[in-house]
Image (tube, rainbow, N blue to C red):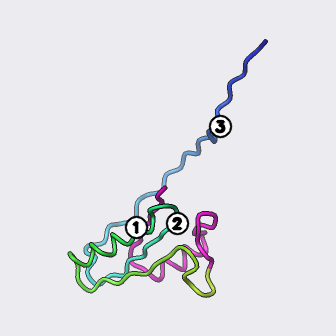
Amino acid sequence: MQLRIMSPAAARVDFKVPPAPRLDTLEGKTIGLYDNMTGGAGVAVDRVAEHIPRRYSNVKFESYGGPRRDGRPSLSRGVHIDEAEAAIIANEVDAMVGAAAH
């Protein structure tokens, strides 16, 4: 008898994405908040939106995730931001905070 052990892990994909340049300040900026609709993600982005204005003035927030935007994809656990939607969002915000909780 022969025993074959297999790993359920996906094959590793190595690629590097350079981080976006830091903003000098968040003052007067528009921050995108992405909630991927997993447990706790909404709490995380709501907390960010609560704390940032305490330190920076004139900050606006745009929310992404769930059925929140007419004519745009309903982002969820199964439907994430694709390249086309990312390009649209990049023109709407100065920075993005994403939460993928579990």
Q: Which element carries disc 2, helix, strand or loop?
A: loop
Query: What residue is shown at x 59% (from left), y 63% (from top)?
Result: 77
Q: Residues within 10 Å of mark 3 (few under 14, many from 20)?
A: few
Quarter of image, res 72: bottom right
Where does residue 35 sit, x and y in percent of width and height? 48, 69
- Extreme residue in the top direction: 1
Residue 99 image offset from top left, x and y in percent: 44, 63
Residue tagged 3: 8
First of labels 1, 2 by sequence position:
2
Q: Which residue is mark 1?
A: 43
**Up-down: is 4 above or below 46?**
above
| Amino acid on which the number 2 mark rests in the picture | Asn
Picture coordinates of residue 47, whole percent (x, y):
33, 70
Residue placed farthest to the right in the image?
1
The answer to which image quadrant residue 97 occupies is bottom left
Q: Which mark is residue 6?
A: none
The image position of residue 63, as x and y in percent, is 46, 78
Q: Is residue 68 left or right of residue 2?
A: left
Say whether residue 68 is left or right of residue 101: right
Which amino acid type corresponds to the residue marked 1 in the rendered image? Val
Between the residue at mark 1 and the residue at mark 2, the CA separation in whole angstroms equals 11 Å
Is residue 36 toward the left or the right of residue 71 in the image?
left
Q: CA distance from mark 1 to mark 3?
A: 31 Å
